[in-house]
Structures are given as structure tokens and as C-alpha cells.
């Protein structure tokens, strides 16, 4: 119950963003500008500062990262049969393939920070930072129908990946972070979480129509993302004897809904964006129940 109450403000901000985007005439340009600010400035500042100033023990965190890679790969494998299982059109199957394993970094870091403070935030930033290129490569490769063209360029300009690598290198080299730089990054980081959650809420929408795929297919992808992967993450944590905070961050990373960027990628690469938007919206709304449930269950299982 305590964990659910600690997470609640984050999900309330998502709902506030949804209401603001529908009830007030800010215009789509306002929300697009906010999304770009969060994506290119605020969250990179948060990721860099969290990793640059964290105490990282590679011997311990390496196993956690490896487990995250393992459950992510499992999500990809489980997503592959969807096209044949549900008789999906190839473009739709390729577009929604990513919905089984891509994750919303904004929600993940917000929840990790709320529950576990700076230590949890740094570990979550490291785990998600390693997973970002993996999920992007898989999503781009599937949408590119195996050509692989554009994967390197997609990663090279991903600000979340670049800031993660920069922060980790800064930490590994033992470089001090000047006080003025630390304070500036901290101000940006404090803004990142609420702005990111508001933009997530503003992007929520459900598309209807037969061309968006059967309900059973959407239920299949959602079940993988919100139920199967967290269970796998918990099993891996038990297998390797992770500490409570490591277990919680691993399960949280697995339980996150699909990122809004999945829709952008599908549209940009000639896929079908509407069913992806539906997956993102339903997954985000359902995660308001499933994430607190997973965290509460972990607390009881200790």
C-alpha cells in the first residue's frame, strides 16, 4: 500500500496531462514542443547527472543489466509468433512487434526516483540506458524488413542513449562534476520528470477499427509486456539472489508500458501508427494498476 501511494502522484501527472490536452486550447504545437524539450534536453540532463555522480559497482550491476537484457530478448521472441497466430497484415505485425518489449523511460525513472531515491534512479538509468540501443535495434530492424539500414543513424542521434553513455564514461573516468554544472543539471533534472509525465498523458489516445488488428492480438502484446516480462524479471532476480532494490528496479523496468517513441518510429518507417498508439495508451493506463501491484507484491514477498 505504501508503494502504491508513493507511485500515485506520477500517474496522476499522466492523467493531468491527458485532461489538459483535451480541455484546454494549448494547441498540438505546444505539446510537440514540450515533448522535444523533454526528449532532447531535460531527460538527457537527468540521465547524465544520475550516472555521472552515482556510485556504480560493475560487479553487482553487471548481473542486473544482464538479466534486463535477458527478459528483453524473451519479449522479442514471444512477440514474433503474433503475425501467424492472429493472421496479421505484415506492416501491422512489424509495427506492433516493438510493443512487447519497448519501455517508457519517463515513467520508469519517475517511479524509481519516487520509491528508491537517487540510488534507485541511478540503477534504473543504467539498466534502461543499456536496454535503449537493444530495443531500438530490434524495432528498427523489424520495421526495415531485415535491411538494417538506418539502425546506426537512429542510435547515433538518440539523446537518451548518448547522455547515458556520456554519464557512464564520466563516472568511469572519475571526473569531478563542477558545482555550477551539477546545480544546473539538477534544475533541469527536477523539471524532467513532471514534464515527461505530462507529455505522456497528452499523447494518450485509442484508435478503433478492424484494420488496427484484432483485440486478441492487442491482449497478447499487452500480456507479454505487463505480465510475462515482469514475472521473468522476478524469476531471474530470485535465481541470481539480487538485493531488494535491484530486484525492484529489474521488475519495474520489465513492467513499464511501451514508450511513445514507438508510435513515432512506426510512422517514420512506413509502418501503421494507429495500432501502436492504441497499445501505448492501453498499456499506460493498465500499468497504473499493474506497476503498483508488482511493487506491492515484491514488498510482501521479501
Image (cartoon, rainbow, N blue to C red):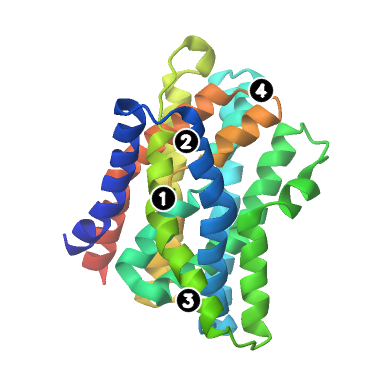
Residue at coordinates 35% horizontally, 59% vertically from top-left?
A: 111
Q: CA distance from mark 1 to mark 4?
A: 32 Å
Q: CA distance from mark 2 to mark 4?
A: 31 Å
Left or right: where 300 falls relative to 165:
left
Q: How many numbered marks does the figure carry?
A: 4
Left or right: where 41 falls relative to 239:
right
Residue matched to label 1: 195
Residue matched to label 3: 183
Q: Position of residue 76 (x, y in %)?
A: 60, 44
Q: Specify which label sits upstream in the sequence, 2 or 1.
A: 2
Left or right: where 197 falls relative to 133:
left
Q: CA distance from mark 3 to mark 1?
A: 19 Å
Most distant residue in the top direction: 210
Residue matched to label 4: 91
Q: CA distance from mark 4 to mark 3?
A: 46 Å
Q: Position of residue 97 (x, y in %)?
A: 59, 35
Residue matched to label 2: 30
Q: Specify which label sits upstream in the sequence, 4 or 3.
A: 4
Q: Residues within 10 Å of mark 2 (few under 14, many from 20)?
A: few
Q: Specify which label sits upstream in the sequence, 1 or 4.
A: 4
Amino acid at each position: 500500500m505504501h508503494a502504491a501511494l508513493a507511485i500515485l502522484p506520477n500517474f496522476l501527472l499522466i492523467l493531468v496531462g491527458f485532461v489538459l490536452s483535451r480541455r484546454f486550447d494549448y494547441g498540438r504545437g505546444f505539446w510537440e514542443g514540450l515533448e522535444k524539450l523533454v526528449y532532447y534536453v531535460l531527460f538527457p540532463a537527468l540521465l547524465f547527472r544520475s550516472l555521472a555522480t552515482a556510485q556504480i559497482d560493475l560487479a553487482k550491476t553487471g548481473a542486473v543489466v544482464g538479466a534486463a537484457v535477458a527478459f528483453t530478448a524473451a519479449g522479442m521472441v514471444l512477440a514474433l509468433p503474433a503475425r501467424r497466430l492472429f493472421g496479421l497484415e505484415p506492416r501491422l505485425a512489424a509495427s506492433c512487434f516493438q510493443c512487447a518489449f519497448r519501455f517508457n523511460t519517463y515513467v520508469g525513472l519517475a517511479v524509481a526516483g519516487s520509491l528508491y531515491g537517487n540510488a534507485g534512479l541511478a540503477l534504473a538509468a543504467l539498466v534502461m540506458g543499456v536496454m535503449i540501443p537493444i530495443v531500438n535495434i530490434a524495432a528498427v530492424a523489424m520495421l526495415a524488413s531485415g535491411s538494417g539500414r538506418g539502425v546506426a543513424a537512429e542510435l547515433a542521434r538518440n539523446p537518451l542513449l548518448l547522455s547515458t553513455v556520456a554519464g557512464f564514461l564520466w563516472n568511469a573516468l572519475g571526473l569531478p562534476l563542477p558545482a555550477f554544472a551539477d546545480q544546473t543539471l539538477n534544475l533541469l533534472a527536477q523539471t524532467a520528470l513532471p514534464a515527461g509525465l505530462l507529455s505522456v498523458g497528452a499523447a494518450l489516445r485509442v484508435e478503433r477499427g478492424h484494420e488496427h488488428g484484432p483485440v486478441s492480438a492487442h491482449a497478447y502484446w499487452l500480456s507479454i509486456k505487463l505480465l510475462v516480462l515482469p514475472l521473468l524479471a522476478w524469476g531471474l532476480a530470485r535465481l541470481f539472489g539480487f538485493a531488494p532494490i535491484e530486484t525492484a528496479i529489474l521488475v519495474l523496468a520489465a513492467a513499464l508500458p511501451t514508450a511513445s517513441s514507438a508510435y513515432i518510429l512506426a510512422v517514420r518507417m512506413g509502418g501503421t501508427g494507429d495500432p501502436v498508439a492504441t497499445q501505448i495508451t492501453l498499456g499506460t493506463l493498465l500499468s497504473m494498476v499493474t506497476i503498483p501491484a508488482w511493487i506491492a507484491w515484491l514488498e510482501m514477498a521479501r
